[in-house]
Every structure is written in C-alpha cells, then in structure tokens.
Image (cartoon, rainbow, N blue to C red):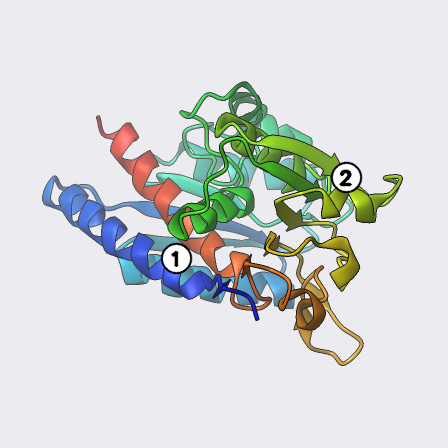
Amino acid sequence: MAKVIMKGAEVAAAMKEKLVREVEDLKARGIEPTMDIVRVGAKPEDLAYERGARKRLEGIGIRLVVTELPEDIDQKHFEEEFSKVNDDPKINGIMLFRPLPKHLDEEPVDRMIDPGKDMDCMSPVNIAKVFSGDETGFAPCTPEGVMEMLNHYGIQLKGKRVTIVGRSMVVGKPLAMLMLKKHATITICHTRTADLAGTCRNAEIVVAAAGKAGMITADMVSEGAVVADVGINVGADGKMCGDVDYENVEPKASYISPVPGGCGSVTSSVLAKHVVIAAGRQNG
C-alpha cells in the first residue's frame, strides 16, 4: 500500500485558509476580488467545472461573474463581448472555457486578453513568462496545482529524476518548466516515446498527463516512486478514472494521487489564488 494517498481536498483546505485571510485584507481596503468566466454555450463539462469553481471561489470570498454567450455567436461579436469583459475595471481575472466551438478562432482573444487578468495562461505573454522562469506570469492552473500538491506533501524536486508523460501546452510542457525552476531533472515523454516503460521506471517521480485511461501500468513504475495522475477519463465502466492503473500501481508507490479526488480538485484553488494575486497587483 502507498505510504501516502495525496488527496486534493487536503491541499485545497490548506490553501483556502491562507486565501481567506488575503481576501479579508483586500476587502478591508475596499477591494472585492472578482473573476469572470466566459462561456460559449452550455456544455455539461463546462457547467460542472463552473459549479465547482463557484463553490470554491465564493467559499473564499471571491465574487464570480459568468458571461454566457450563445453557441452560434460569430467571431466579430465574440471578440466584442470578450473585449468588454477584458476592459471592465471591476474584473480582476478572466477564464475562458476552451475548446471553443469550431467556427470560432481563439487566437485573437489569446492576444487580446490582459496578461494581468489571464488566470489560466492563455496570453503569449504569460506563456513566455512561464517558459523563461518569470514568476510574475500566471501559469496554467493544472500544472501549478500539481506543484501545490507536491509541495504540500513535502516532496522535494531538487535533483530528482522526473518523467512527465504528456507534452501538451495545457499540462506537460508548462509543468516541465515549473519543475525545472525547482531544479528537477525532467524527461518529457509521449505516445511515440521509445521504451516508455523503461523511461518511467527510471524516474523517482512520474506525472501522468497523456489523456489515456490506465496507460501507466505497474510494470512502468519503480518501487517507492511518487505518482501524480493528472488524467481525467471515463473508463469502460462509465466511471471517471485517471491515466494511471491505480489499483495495481498504488501498492508500489510511496505517494500517489487518486482520480477523482487528486490533482484535479486543486485546480480551482489555484484559480482562486491567481484571482487574489491579480486583485492585489491591480490595486497597488
């Protein structure tokens, strides 16, 4: 059995305690931290995340506004509506639900968004800051959530061999940059990596972020490894599961995060953290 099951709720609770105090300080100065979720249409997964984010943000004292746009909105009107949110001085942070409907082009709003309000690293400015090690940029919430979890459980990265399975700009690549800044030695793998199993076995820390249910099996993990599962999939039984074959990997790991209830549940806490930081910066 794993030495420790890394539970997102425990990390989120610790973050909440600190964030509540910071929000109280801001409100004492007449500042109400406010975030706007921009949502095109009403996909069930977007609505589910929105409900969770609302509960987390409002529980900390952050005001949440939702800008819902029709699914058939054209590019011109989409950009106009996004611009209104972006220019609103009362809005400290913005999160756009992606992917957008296929008829909409995301690139113009990626370049339009104020980097200081960009809560999930849409802006090329924030992407560049993450890759250059500039901590004034907002990293994507999910990889930062992985970092919060590892830090909470006292897992040191300095000098450690880390294998990240997944090379997306949403998790894999920015997470590699965040870990490099903490002096880890990073290998990024993907579905075409030769000897993926051997590369994972050589790692002291494995992060699964490929988006394929159960692809990290017990033979791919060394005894005592730390395993962080970022994957969110629906298994053959219709239940949510991660990228790790949890049942068989868990006995070999020293620390492991479950799905659900692991890394994903820290993401909205990171979002709240970003809003609080943004509100503070925008108000001196």
- Give the quadrant of the C terminus: top left
Marks 1 & 2, CB-CB < 8 Å contact: no
Tag 1 secondary structure: helix
* Quarter residue 232 falls in: bottom right
Depth check, front residue: 120 or 260: 260
- Ranked by sequence position, the earlier of labels 1 and 2 is 1
Amino acid type indicated by mark 1: Val
Residue at 76%, 72% in the rendered image: 235
Residue 144 relative to residue 25: left or right? right
Q: Position of residue 139 (x, y in %)?
A: 50, 35
User: Which circle marks residue 11 in the picture?
Assistant: 1
Can residue 90 be seen here? Answer: yes
Judging depth in this view, the residue of 205 and 144 nearest the camera is 205
In this picture, residue 216 sits left or right of residue 254 = right
The kind of residue tagged 2 is Cys
Image vertical order of residue 56 relative to residue 112, above or below: below
User: What label sits on residue 189 in the rendered view?
Assistant: 2
Q: Is residue 42 visible?
A: no
Q: Which mark is residue 159?
A: none
Farthest residue to the bottom: give it: 237
